[in-house]
Amino acid sequence: MALNACTLTAAVTAAANSLACRMDDDELAVMAAMFTQLGDTLALIAVQRGLCNARRQKNSSEQTNAQA
């Protein structure tokens, strides 16, 4: 996804407004909680991937150094 920050935030705002105008307050609250959980879970996955990649690179570097 190659959107710049302004385009991305405008798109998210437009999507939120479009969804919100079609929902009652209870539906909106559930949708907000669902997207909060989705965002938190995606952030956790991204952090975990970063840690795993860093470990892999460290192990690979250590193996290369040991062979030298």
Image (tube, rainbow, N blue to C red):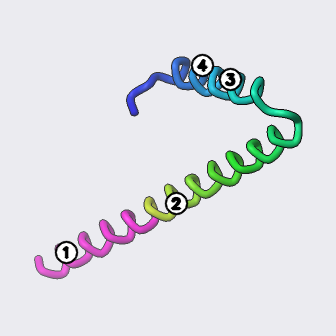
Choose mark 4 or mark 2, whichever is in front.
Answer: 4
Q: Report how far apart the C-alphas of labels 2 and 1 lie in the structure.
A: 30 Å
**Secondary structure under the numbered disc 3 in the rendered image:** helix
The disc at residue 45 is: 2
**Secondary structure under the numbered disc 4 in the rendered image:** helix
Choose mark 1 or mark 3, whichever is in front.
Answer: 3
> N-terminal of the two: label 1 or label 4?
4
Q: Report how far apart the C-alphas of labels 1 and 3 lie in the structure.
A: 55 Å
Side (left or right) of 61 relative to 27: left
Would you call the spot at circle 1 few (<14 residues within 10 Å), some (14-19), or many (20 or more)? few
Do residues under tags 2 and 1 come within 8 Å of each other at their CB atoms? no
> N-terminal of the two: label 2 or label 3?
3
Residue 34 lies, in percent from the top left, at 71, 50
Q: What stretch is highlighted in magenta?
A: 51-68
Judge by depth and name the residue closer to the eye, 11 or 21: 21
> What residue sits right under mark 4 in the picture?
10
> What residue sits right under mark 3 in the picture?
18
The disc at residue 65 is: 1
> N-terminal of the two: label 1 or label 3?
3
Judge by depth and name the residue closer to the eye, 9 or 33: 33
Side (left or right) of 25 relative to 62: right
